[in-house]
Amino acid sequence: MAKDVGRKVVASNRKARHDYVIEDVFEAGLVLRGTEVKALRMGRASLVDGWCEVTNHELWLEGVHIPEYSQGTWTNHAPRRKRKLLLHRQEIDRLESKTREKGQTIIPLSLYFLDGRAKVEIALARGKREWDKRQALRERQDNMEATRAIREKRDL
């Protein structure tokens, strides 16, 4: 069987960019069990409640839901178990020092297969306040209205 070529997105956390200010993005490998890989290949996962934490100089992904594989037997995995992330030591140390700062956290942005290997895109982020979210939404709406007005003026 030929390896999948390219990037196949399984799940993305679209709300993360609304709730957080993304400061830095990393790509990490994911340690998975066989039934988890098969469930991901079916395109089933949820990153909504996910977060990462550094424990004993290892990075762990928690709160991510990968449902049980439907054809799995007693070897099936727990849907919300902790999963180890694979990063270089310098990257883990950098993330660990940054998350000690108040308000900094590590969140998953997307889960995908890259050339047949499961990867997760994680971000060092700072939570937005309510007025930040409203301001960002207002700016996006203003930009859409401006482009719409330019398009209508051009079509006349």
Image (cartoon, rainbow, N blue to C red):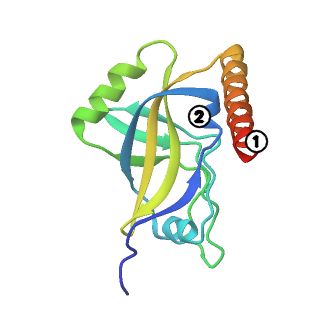
Query: Looking at the rendering, which quadrant does residue 119 occupy?
Result: bottom left
150 relative position to 118: left or right: right
The type of residue carrying mark 1 is: Glu
Q: Nearer the viewer, residue 30 or 10?
A: 10
Position above or below: 121 against 112: above
Mark 2 is surrounded, within 10 Å at the Cα level, by few (under 14), some (14 to 19) or many (20 or more) other residues, namely some
Position above or below: 107 against 105: below
Secondary-structure class at tag 2:
helix
Q: Position of residue 30 (x, y in %)?
A: 40, 54
126 relative position to 118: left or right: right
Q: Position of residue 80 (x, y in %)?
A: 60, 50
64 relative position to 32: left or right: right
38 relative position to 97: left or right: right
Going 60% across and 76% down the picture, which residue do you hit? 73
Which mark is nearer the camera, 1 or 2? 1
For label 2, the residue is 17
Going 39% across and 56% down the picture, which residue do you hit? 31
Q: Position of residue 48 (x, y in %)?
A: 65, 43
- Quadrant of the image containing the N terminus: bottom left
Q: Nearer the viewer, residue 73 or 125?
A: 125
Q: Which residue ends up furthest to the front in the rendered image?
A: 156
Going 23% across and 37% down the picture, which residue do you hit? 89
Secondary-structure class at tag 1:
helix
For label 1, the residue is 152
The type of residue carrying mark 2 is: Arg
Mark 1 is surrounded, within 10 Å at the Cα level, by few (under 14), some (14 to 19) or many (20 or more) other residues, namely few
- Quadrant of the image containing the C terminus: top right
Position above or below: 73 against 87: below
Going 69% across and 36% down the picture, which residue do you hit? 150
**Disc number placed over residue 42 in the picture, else none:** none
